[in-house]
Image (cartoon, helix red, strand yellow):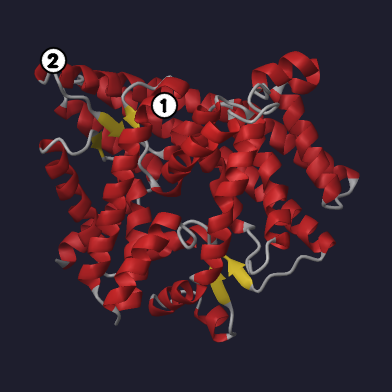
Amino acid sequence: MEVIVSAVNWFLGLGSSVIVPIVLIFLGLIFKVGFAKAVRGGVITGIGLAGLNLITNLIVVALQPAVQALADRLGIVKDIVDINWADAGIAWGWPGVAGVVLGIIVVNIIMLVLRLTKTLWVDVWSYWHGSALAGFVWAMTNNILLGVIAGVLYLVIGGLFSDITAKKFQEFNDMPGIGVPCGTTVQAAIFAIPVVWVLDRIPGLKDLDASPENIRKRLGLVGEPAILGLLLGIIIGIAAGYNVQQFLGLGMQVATMMVVLPRMVSLIAEGIVPITLSIVQYMKNRFKDRELYVAVDCAVLLGHPAVMASSVILFPLYILLAAVLPGVRMLPIASLAVVPFWAGAVVPYTKGNVIKTVIVLLLYAIPFMYLGTLLVNSQTQTYQMMNMYSDQIAQGLQLGSWDMGGDPLGSLIRGVFSLFGR
């Protein structure tokens, strides 16, 4: 068993930009894509993911201090420390991680055979969401098996959500055959479906065209993604109290992201689409009534200009929202990193409408804010059992996050498994 655990941990330690190409090449060979096409597609996809991660990290690192400075200027203070994706440390370090990985692979194959799902969940990197939840349940119940079951259940539900959202993601992003089952990203899409239905029936709002294309048409040069990004960065920098050098620098960083990020997603599409198309065609040739979606990293949803435009607008709005909502004890600074991925899942449903996307995601964040506060003791306990942040916890600090700490689906599953006690 230790050998299996070590092998799984080693593989997962490669990171998404290495894991995804390996899996895609492996799939390409299984589904007769052809050696050259499979290798080229896998490597190009990995390059696109690596570039995308660099750009996404650039903008988050640039904007987080500005948002923190804005909060400081407004005198907003919260007592829970936001550590967001540090939850991945739980995911890959808790004792049952190998059980979650092997469990979802087996269950997914069984569900595909029984036609209970269309999503072939090969996005191994995104298993971390289910494994982090499993770690929370393990710490809560002191039972590894219950943790594994909870983690696999979470991932299974994510796969079913992928079945619902896949067609919309494929058509909007021009990536046939893909599915995105990961974590709070696919939940954002599910949440958007009824909210957008309501928004599309509100007079004045339903006919408002706030797509980047229409903004560019109406505003001319100011509506260009690069110029719009420059202005948004400058405005946030001024609000944060930055000097001229600082806010101009922030503006250029946001502008860079607005231009380069879609090109990285285009690179991912160049690599992944030939492989997914070949897999879909393979299935159609052999199983006339079967349709298969290949699970991919949620980063593929970031290419549309509305994604980052909405995200940059949302960053300061989330700080203000956390400040005014009673009972919310965490200021979402580190957790802002998840916002572009939420936006990527929502814009296909708002048809790229920036205003509707912002409204949907303001509403979507509210349960995260309250659940992240409500479950902070359980989350801190998990870090303590993992010997993570020992000094901070010893000082009496409580540690929380949105993804996975405030995850609505994960919180529901944690609530059910809490009935089993310790």
3D distance between C-alphas at marks 2 and 1 = 24 Å
Q: Which residue is mark 1?
A: 168
Comparing 414 with 283, the one in front is 414
Q: Amino acid at mark 1?
A: Lys
The answer to whether 422 is drawn above or below residue 383 in the figure is below
Tell me which residue sits at (82%, 52%) in the image.
240
Task: Answer yes or no: is residue 100 visible.
Answer: yes
Local packing at callout 2 (Cα closer than 10 Å; few below 14, some 14-19, many 20+) is: few
In the image, taking residue 114 as reference, residue 267 lies left or right, namely right
Q: Position of residue 40 (x, y in %)?
A: 32, 23
Task: Answer yes or no: is residue 91 visible.
Answer: no
Write down the quadrant of residue 20 in the picture: top left
The quarter of the rendered structure image containing the N terminus is: bottom left
Comparing 139 with 194, the one in front is 194
**Mark drawn on residue 285:** 2
Q: Position of residue 342 (x, y in %)?
A: 52, 42
Comparing 422 with 302, the one in front is 422
Tell me which residue sits at (42%, 20%) in the image.
171
